[in-house]
Amino acid sequence: MPYKDPDRQRAAKAEHARRARRGTLSGTFGPLVSGAERLDTARDVLDVLQGQLAAVLAADDLDTAGRARTVATLCGLALRAIEAGDLAGRLEALERHLGGRAA
């Protein structure tokens, strides 16, 4: 248990049991992306992240802090995908440029 205080342990265990009975143990939306989608390029990742961001912003059951955390995480992932796409484009251009030279 994460708590040393027995009263907090008992409260956490009771809350866990309540959530388990209600079926809201995970607290997540579940899979919003089908398993058939292939994420081969940074553009594919950005498209999925855009859909997830729209779903989070439209969700009524998230509090402001939870929504802000999720949006910040998705934006960080989007920035990394953009950087990866830029890097891949630059690498392809460099390979084309150097492709004419003998190895």
Image (spheres, grey):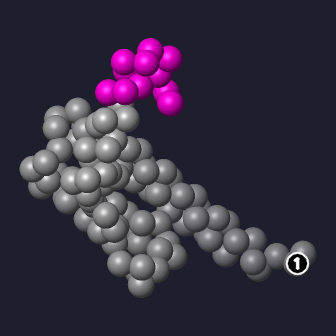
Q: Which residues are magenta?
A: 1-11
Residue 66 placement (x, y as % from top left) = 25, 38
What amino acid is labelled 1 in the image?
A: Ala
Which one is in front, 25 or 66?
A: 25
Q: Is residue 10 magenta?
A: yes
- Which residue is rendered at x = 29% and y = 68% of the image? 32
- Which residue is rendered at x = 55% and y = 66% of the image? 89
Residue 102 placement (x, y as % from top left) = 88, 78
Q: Secondary structure at mark 1?
A: loop
Q: Is residue 15 magenta?
A: no
- Which residue is rendered at x = 47% and y = 66% of the image? 42
Please indicate whether residue 7 sits to the left or right of residue 4 in the image: left
Q: As displayed, is residue 40 above or below residue 57? A: below
Which one is in front, 97 or 53?
A: 53
For the C terminus, give its image quadrant: bottom right
- Which residue is rendered at x = 61% and y = 69% of the image? 93
Residue 29 placement (x, y as % from top left) = 27, 59
Q: Pointer 1: what residue?
A: 102
Please indicate whether residue 78 sits to the left or right of residue 62 in the image: right
Please indicate whether residue 33 sits to the left or right of residue 81 in the image: left
Q: How many marks?
A: 1
Q: Is residue 47 visible?
A: no
Which one is in front, 10 or 53?
A: 10
